[in-house]
Amino acid sequence: MESIFTKAIGDTPKIKVLEFLIEGRELDYSISDIAEGAEIGRTTLFRIWDDFIELGLVKPTRIIGNAKLYKLNLENAFVRKIVEMFDTLVIEPLNKKKKVVVRG
């Protein structure tokens, strides 16, 4: 199901990767995990990954075996703005729907 985020700004592989990383912004992921989570092919991810690195959108965190793990770079100004937009479009409306009614 397409999210309001991808409906609002597009459904490209780059947007899908950004959305996946924003949703799990506190975690780090391998390239395979990112491709699977963003629902794109590894080849497609490899084609766009250099842009993410060069722009500082992601940063390497650690190496486990042969896998290098990455996470969203929350220190990057663009990333902070896109996270703010994501939270405004997706998270805030969800929080408003979760109003709890307590009856005595």
Image (cartoon, rainbow, N blue to C red):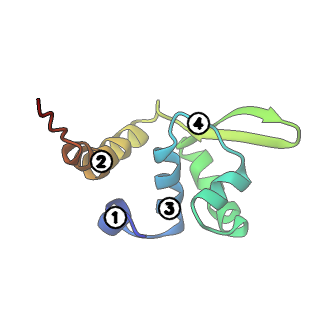
What distance separates the C-alpha of mark 2 from that of mark 3?
A: 15 Å
Labelled disc at residue 62: none
Asked if the residues shown at circle 2 and circle 4 are in contact, with their CB atoms under 8 angstroms apart, the answer is no
45 sits left or right of 85 in the view: right
Q: Earlier in the sequence, mark 3 or mark 4?
A: 3
Q: Which of 9 and 98 is in front in this view?
A: 98
Residue at far left of view: 104
The residue indicated by pointer 1 is 9
* Rendered residue at 52%/43% (across/down): 57
Q: Nearer the viewer, residue 40 or 52?
A: 40
- What is the x, y in percent for residue 53? 62, 46
What distance separates the C-alpha of mark 2 from that of mark 4?
A: 20 Å
- What is the x, y in percent for residue 32? 73, 55
Q: Indicate the quadrant where residue 102 lies.
A: top left
- What is the x, y in percent for residue 67? 81, 43
Residue at far front of view: 104
* Rendered residue at 31%/44% (across/down): 87
The residue indicated by pointer 4 is 27
Asked if the residues shown at circle 1 and circle 2 are in contact, with their CB atoms under 8 angstroms apart, the answer is yes
What distance separates the C-alpha of mark 1 from that of mark 2?
A: 10 Å
Q: Which of marks 1 and 3 is nearer the N terminus?
A: 1
Labelled disc at residue 85: 2
Query: Mark 2 packing: few (<14 Cα in 10 Å), some, or many (20+)?
Result: few
Q: Nearer the viewer, mark 2 or mark 4?
A: 4
Q: Tag 2: residue type?
A: Met
Q: What element carries label 4?
A: loop
What distance separates the C-alpha of mark 4 from that of mark 1?
A: 24 Å
